[in-house]
Every structure is written in structure tokens, then in C-alpha cells.
Amino acid sequence: MEEKQNLYWRRLDNSAKIFPLSVSKKYSTVFRLSCVLKEKVAPHILQKAVEKALEVYPFFKVKLKSGFFWYYLEENPKKPMVEIESNYPCKYIDPKSNRQYLFKVTYFDKKINIDVNHVLTDGNSATNFFKEIIYTYLELKHEKNFEEEIRTIRKVEYTSEDSYLKNYNKKAKNNASSQKAYILQGKRIALGAISTIHEIIDFDALKKICKEKDVTVTMFLTAVLIYAIYEANFKPYHGKKPIKVCIPVNLKKYFPSTTLSNFFSYITVEAHMKNLDTFEEILQFVKLEFKQKLTEKEVVTTMSSNVKLGTNAIIKGIPLLLKKMLVRIGYVEIRKYTTITFSNILRKGIIGKYQDYIDEFLFMIAPEPVEKIKCSACTFNNQLVFTFTSILEDIQIEETFYHFIKQLGIPITRQSNGVLEIKPPRKEK
Amino acid sequence: MLYPKKINAKKGKKVIQIGIAISIIIALILWGIQKIFTPQSHWAWITIACMIYAWIITLYSIKTCQNIAGHVFLQMLAVSALLVYIDYITGFAKWSLNIAIPIIIMTANSIMLILTIVARNRYIQYVIYQIFICIVSFLPVVFITEHLVKDEIFSYLALGVSIVNLIVFVILCHQSLIEGIKRKLHM
């Protein structure tokens, strides 16, 4: 009992407060990072690597507990469990079958995965922890090649502070659009399966095109995504509402912070398709939207209006049980303000020597009953992997995206998890 | 190869549809047999109810990734104990041993059999419950050898279904079985 009282605990950050209230088997709030090695994964070494990485990042050695008003995180004295990959990516992490951990490390063939519940952290900080696992794994597996690295213990400086509370603007007004978004239509895949399609794009060729068009890679991919949705789903289903793409933004770019807790905001690109028809029009529109919305002022305003909800005295005073009920009732409605989420966690910087053992990095986010497709991108070496995670049976959006990039002359290949069949490349007539 | 081999969504749907169709045909056959040979008894309806129960649990668990083996094991024990108790306090006519427990065992094993075939990759952490289910499923052997049952047909049927489940489970999931035993029973 005494031991239990001495266990370290911490509050959830402002953004994480909502996740456990809404989390269920349908809304998993899980994202996945994968690293494909050049050799088969040794499970017992991976187990050791995860345990060692947790010593460097005890921040992740926690379990979720419920208080009277809010959930909180408490130290987890159990060892984490590494397992062979057997489920679909980003599925709900059942704490009971995962020794109460909020992340799950799995492996398959040459690939190491970490599924992370968003309650714990955001994609940016999870990447640091995942890289630590990969570094440690490679050091343990190839001891001789990494002797120097083993002797130097990596020191990681971080905090678990709530950087939202430290940096938000109390006077900021809500800048969110009140119009609901176009919701992707189509039949869902049976029995809770999740389809994953990776579009592997040559980064240099993509960058060259972006340079020619004077846009960033994220802007360009957002425009292609809107175009693909428009052609493959919006038009056939005669959509009327705007296509809204939610793009998470790393707030550490705007505020100095060493926290490992969630610290992100988002911008919403709101495309009214009445005025947009060609790709070029969409691209110019996206460019303008980014210019207007991806500014410190706008990002802070969005972040602040969300923080104000979590710090509201009335909301704070509602018992957890009631909060949970209210959020679950309202969550489906809240989600209707976004068509799709596209998260680009940019280039994965890996220390030189370790790069020789790695083939590629993958990043994916869990789709939901309302946002039926979610997109993510991640770059390593000269490969950008754009991933569609979907619960829709129809893969027309993925197909349109692929063929559009291909017809621009950018080298692109595809891989899927086999849930849905990818059509073979079209034969030129 | 980036991902473990999954059943393609369309193929998986087809397997389930074929399974349901077969179940409906079996249900109709059983109902016909009952109508012709034993019109005074309603045993076919009990079996049909168990089949419906098995399908609901199977589809729900595939969809939600629940610890189905744990639930099935617990329900199997709890419902059996409850029925034996009801039987005991109503004069111990032994209907619970003759019919009820063998049917429960058949239902539990059928659920596990379907899940083993359809989604075996997922059940490494639930192996231990599958083993418990298999062990408990051999109870009808005790019923028969100890002459606790008059009508042995259901006990033999339950035994048959349990053996089929065990054989399929060992053939398809032997690696998970070894890994699960190592993990759960390490000293």
C-alpha cells in the first residue's frame, strides 16, 4: 500500500484531457510509427531495448488512472511487453492486455512498430522515444559496431510540463469556422478492419515539382489530397459542404519547450469546391490558406480557444463520469467539422551510423467512424511515405492520389496491408 | 512484406457469409429432424439459440478485438455452475449434466473454432484461456466414465467438438501456443 502511495503521478496535459473521455474501440486515438530495418527483428533484443529506452524516458512508463474530475497518469511498475504484430495498425490499445501501458511495441519480419495512445504524447515526442528504442536495439544487436555509442550514455533533457498552460493567450477569441465539413461517403470495410495503403514517393522529384510551383511539400500534398477527395468522393456523391483538411502543427516551432507531453495545435484548410475545379486552382487556394492560417497569431488563437475549454471552472467542476457521458454524446458532432486529417511529421533525422541498418520509416493515424480516412506522411532518406489509413471499402481516393502523382512524372510505388486489393498499374494504350 | 498476412476484406466477408449460410442450413435440418422424429421435444430450438449466441459473440469479438477467450471461458464456467445449481435445487434430474453442459461446451468450442480459423493471428495473448476451455471441455469424459449421465449422446457430441477444436487449434496456432505457455507460466 505504502509502495503504491509513493508511485509518481502527473496530470494530463490540456490536449490529452479530451482523449480518454472519448476513447473507445471506435475512437482509438492511437497513432503508429514503424521502422523497417534491413534485417529480421530479434524479439528478445527488442524487449531489452524497450526496457532500456524506458530507463532513458521514464515519462512513458505510466498507466492511465481515473480521478474524481479528470484522468491522470501514474507510474507503471510492470515491464512492457513486446509482441508479434497481429492486429490492424492503430487499433484501440486495451490496457488490460498490455500491462496497463499506453503504448505498444510490436514487430513483424523486419519491421518494428510502436502504437501510441495520444493521451500520452504527440507524434513529435513519440518519435524521440521510438528513435531511442531503435538506437538501443541496433546497439544491442550489433554491439561491436556501436561500441563507442554504448560507452556514451545518451542524456535526454525533457520535462512533462503542460506547455499549453504556459503559453496560451487568455484573451484570444475563437477563430473556428462554424460550418460543418463534407463527410466522406461510402461503404465501410466489414468487421472493424483497417486498410493501410502506403504511397512511397521519391522525395527529390517531389521537392523539385514543389519548387517549380513555389509551394512547400505539405501544401502540395494537401492540394493533391483535396483534389483526390473532390474527384473520387465529393463529385460522385454530389457533396455540398466544404472539404476541410485538418493539419496538425508542432507548437515547439513557435514556443521554446522541452516537454514530452502533447504540444500541438492545428490549422484547417477549408475548401469550398464551388469556386475550385482544377488542381491548379486548388493548389493556389491551399497556398493562400497556409499563408493566412499558418502564422503564429492564428495558431496561438486556435490553441488558446481549446485551452480555455480545459481551464473553464464549470467544466473543471463536472465529475469525470458525467464529463465522459457528455463528451461521448457530443464527440460525433464535434468530429463533423473535419473531412480528413493530414499529419506530416517531416524528415526523420537518424544518426549517420544507424542509417545503414534502416530502410524506411512509416507513420499512420487511426481512422474513425466520422473521419473515415486519415492521412500521414513521413520522410527518411530520399523517400516520403504518404499513408492512407481507411475504414472505407472504396479506394478511389487512394487511386486518384496515386495516379495524379504518377502522371506528374514523380516516381511512386505502393504497398498495402492486404485488407483491400490495390489495382495493378494501368497499361498504357 | 510489411504486414502479417490478413484475410482480404472481401474474402473475410465471404467466409462469414458462407458460415452464416451453413448455420442456417444446419438449423433448418435440425428443426426438420425434430419435427419428424421428436415433435414433443424442443431440443432443436436450444441448439439454434446456441448457434445465434455463438455468431453474435463471434462477430462482436472480431469487430472489437475483445479478449473473447477470457469471456467465453468465464461464461462457460458461470452458466454451467448456475444450471447445475438450478438442477440441484429442483430435484437433480440431471438435465444440466445430460444436455445443458454438453451444449454449453459445444457452443464455447464452436466460437473458439470459428475465431481460430478467421482471426488466429490475434490470439497469442489469449492462448491460456483457450487451453483452459479445452481442459474444461473434457468434463463429459468424467460424466460418462462416472456414469453421471443417462443419455450419453450429448456428452459424446461435446467431446467430439472439443477434440476437433483442440486439433485445429494445435495445427494452426502451435507457435502461439508455445509462446503463450512460455510467457504466462514462466517461473
Image (cartoon, rainbow, N blue to C red):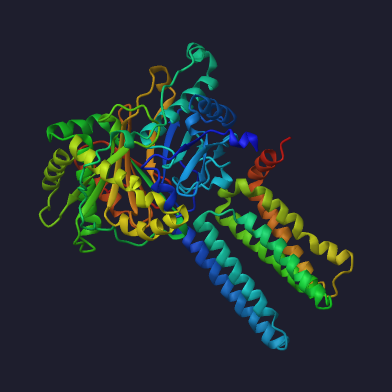
Judging depth in this view, the residue of B67 and B39 nearest the camera is B67
At which x and y percent is residue B66? 55, 54
Q: Quadrant of the N terminus of chain A?
A: top right
Residue drawn at (89%, 65%) of the image? B146
At which x and y percent is residue A31? 41, 42
Examine the rendering and report whether any part of residue B154 can be seen.
Answer: no
Judging depth in this view, the residue of A369 and A192 nearest the camera is A369
At which x and y percent is residue A287? 14, 40
Left or right placement of residue A92 versus residue B69 in this view: left
Classify A413 as above or below B168. Answer: above
Left or right placement of residue A298 versus residue B76 in this view: left
Which corner quadrant of the image does residue A163 belong to? top left
Which corner quadrant of the image does residue A333 belong to? bottom left
Residue drawn at (53%, 61%) of the image? B60
Left or right placement of residue A7 versus residue A320 in this view: right
Classify B134 as above or below B86. Answer: above
Q: Residue furthest right?
A: B146
Left or right placement of residue A79 versus residue A410 in this view: right
Which corner quadrant of the image does residue A99 belong to? top right
At which x and y percent is residue B138? 78, 59
Judging depth in this view, the residue of B27 and A259 nearest the camera is A259
Residue drawn at (64%, 82%) of the image? B31
Residue drawn at (48%, 63%) of the image? B14
Examine the rendering and report whether any part of residue A15 can be seen.
Answer: yes
Report the label total: 0
